[in-house]
Amino acid sequence: MRKRAPVLVLFASLAAMVTGTAAYAQFGGTIGSIIKVAGIGYAVKVFGGQINSFLNTVLQEHNVGGLPATKVVPIIRLGSTTAVGAVQVAGRPDVVSRVQAAVEGDLVVGRAQLRYLLPVNSLSLSKLPGRVSGVGVSAIIDFPV
């Protein structure tokens, strides 16, 4: 239980940050959203290793563990909704180490809607990030903005 305490404190802090800035977002609109996105993105970058360890422990307790290598990276959201979060990717260690983010988006084809998460090798959208093949998403941590 002692190992989980820092991660639980992290999740409580993130929840407080999200709800604490909700009132500011009502008055600040875009500025409030930017603060939340930046804050959660920073928390994912700083605490990604601890979040990853916590997720691995939880998955192993539910007999879903045994993944070769895992890493927590931020989500880059494309589309009409605004949210921020992170995903845990899993695969061979040499491939997982190349993943920097996951691009999320929606495609609508007729009456069908497709939501996708693609592991990519860059956090920047100024240049087109490359897809990292050979890894999958094993967990999603999502915070609505």
Image (cartoon, rainbow, N blue to C red):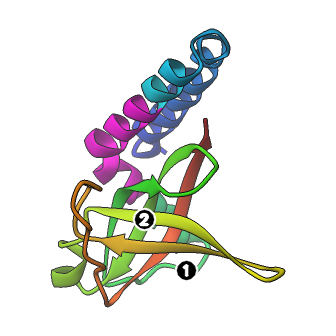
Q: Secondary structure at mark 2?
A: strand
Say which residue label 2 marks.
103
Residue located beneath label 1 in the image: 64
Q: Is residue 19 left or right of residue 132?
A: right
Front position in the image: 137 or 34: 34
Q: Position of residue 11 (x, y in %)?
A: 52, 36
Direction front: furthest residue? 110
Q: Position of residue 29 (x, y in %)?
A: 59, 20
Q: Amino acid at mark 2?
A: Val
- Which badge, 2 or 1, comes first in the chain's sequence? 1
Left or right: 57 in relation to 71: right
The residue lying at 37 percent from left, 78 percent from top is 90
Residue 32 or residue 108, whichever sits in front: 108
Numbered badge on residue 51: none
Residue at 50% x, 58% y is: 78
In the figure, residue 39 lies in which quadrant?
A: top left
Residue type highlighted by circle 1? Val
